[in-house]
Amino acid sequence: MAKPRKRYAVCGLSNRAIATFIRPILGATAGAAGAEDGVLGYGAGADDFSEVAELVAIVDVDQPRVGAFLSTLPDSAGSVPAYVPDDVQQMIIDCRPDVLIVATPDYAHADYIRAGLEHGLEVISEKPMTATAAQAEAVRQTVAETGGRVRVTHNLRYTPRHRRMKELIMDGAIGRVLQVGLSYHVDVRHGASYFVRWNRRRARSGGLQVHKSCHHLDLVNWLIDDLPDRVSAVGALAFYGPRGAHRPHDRDGAPVTGGALADHDPYYRQDGPGGVLPAPGGEQRSGSDVPYTVQYRVEEPMTIYDDAIDIEDHYSALIGYRSGAALLYSIDFSSPWEGYELTVTGTHGRLVTRYARDLDGNPMPGNDRIDLQPLFADPEQITVQTGGSGHDGADPAMRADLFGEPSAESGRLGLAATLDQAAYAVAAGEAIWRSAETGRTVMVDDLLA
Ligand SMILES: NC(=O)c1ccc[n+]([C@@H]2O[C@H](COP(=O)([O-])OP(=O)(O)OC[C@H]3O[C@@H](n4cnc5c(N)ncnc54)[C@H](O)[C@@H]3O)[C@@H](O)[C@H]2O)c1
């Protein structure tokens, strides 16, 4: 007899949820409303888990958005019940999910994760697990009380390049890790887009240090099998916000506003009509073809220069690890290309890699290699697979683990983030903005205490 399909409820009908979870659960081609890969990188799902997984409910503050999405689905899927956040307990009673997928804006993850755990459900949460270290600690306590399980989608680990680096480090190719350098750049289109989305408010996203950098902090924590201990950082808002460096002004020195921004501002001109930014004064775009009606309202248009922006757009940090290793990390959200340079230095050698793509998301040459530089032997160039769909092939590999049995490789490399690893990725991110704000070194464990 065929095994019954696992029952999944999704909290937050986000672009990420549609592309990464809902389409694969329903079958790859289901629904016209799939957010695609591309500049915002939601990670399109081309694989099909409909034989082992079933969508039983959607919870979202935006019922018209859910209705518009369901109307794009074929018959049976289109009748999936929709609930508002206050009715999440009722949803669990009515729909009997086995697994809760949490893919709302980051600030709301903790409450859904804890509700799922308290009802004995498995939980899969989008990264970051939570928007604050205090919320992460509350989740850890709920896990301790309920004995439940939370899996957090730290997908960056799964790209072939990072799996190979982890293998090399585990095999001792560079000895004991002493230093890591990670210099990350988010391009002018992708970077600007954060400043016209919910991410631009610390209360919603924890700042980009948590929302975005949790990927990078987790990657390093996992690669070197260590946890961050202390953080010293500087950072500020320079490209976006009311005093943005490129903000156009008229002859009298007043900022250009409204539709005129589209003609006079380099970010809007670069992005162009139909790009990722909403036209100044216009409606917020969705990566999928279902509009937002609650989170973004036509009456409250956003621009990248709004006073409401309260996060930083570039920062640098020195992060000390429990073993004594150090990470020198920097990121900016206004770069002419997107990608990073990563160097891991150990007692016996060094690993160097680089990934870059242009403004249209096309990979640039040189992405397919890792350089292994042993201290006392010839250097070696290691070729890695690159260019797969869904974040360079990471999302399909992660989904195979999430919806099926974890692969042998996954077990060997520890590909799935543990609860503690997910919590420290959040806490280290929070430590970055807190250190930049206070000018002091922040002890990561103090934030989780
Ligand atoms: N792993 C990755 O590579 C990756 C990529 C993109 C986004 N993400 C994560 O996915 C999540 C969603 O991000 P997105 O940009 O796709 O979101 P989005 O802005 O596209 O959608 C958010 C959805 O949540 C709904 N919502 C808002 N508040 C809610 C609440 N309290 N309860 C229920 N629903 C609520 C909104 O109405 C909307 O439908 C975030 O946690 C983000 O960090 C991860």
Image (cartoon, rainbow, N blue to C red):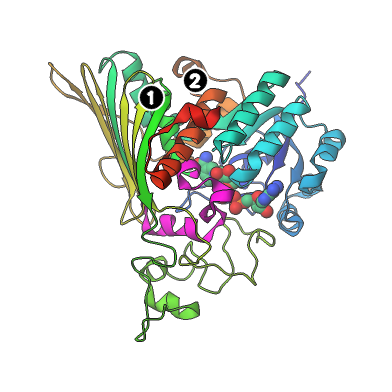
Whether residue 324 sits left or right of residue 89 in the image: it is: left
Residue type for callout 1? Leu
Whether residue 315 sits left or right of residue 282 in the image: it is: left
Which image quarter: residue 28? top right
Instruction: Name the disc covering residue 25, or none.
Output: none
Residue 336 in the image: above or below residue 266: above
The residue closer to the viewer here, 127 or 35, is 127
Mark 1: few/some/many CA within 10 Å (<14, 14-19, 20+):
many
Between discs 2 and 1, the one toward the N terminus = 1
Residue at image position (50%, 34%) is 427
Residue at image position (45%, 37%) is 431
Q: Is residue 19 visible?
A: no
Farthest bottom residue? 251
Which image quarter: residue 175? top left
Residue ID for mark 1: 223
Q: Is residue 332 magenta?
A: no
Element under label 1? helix
Whether residue 217 sits left or right of residue 199 in the image: it is: left
Q: Nearer the viewer, mark 2 or mark 1?
A: 1
The residue closer to the viewer here, 366 or 141, is 141
If the image is split into quadrants, where does the C terminus sit? Answer: top right
Instruction: Name the disc covering residue 410, or none.
Output: 2
- Estimate the x, y position of residue 328 in percent, counting from the top left: 30, 35
Q: CA distance from mark 2 to mark 1?
A: 14 Å
- Estimate the x, y position of residue 103 in percent, counting from the top left: 63, 42
- Estimate the x, y position of residue 434 in percent, counting from the top left: 45, 42
Residue type for callout 2? Ser
Element under label 2? helix
> Magenta segment range?
185-211
The residue closer to the viewer here, 329 or 254, is 254
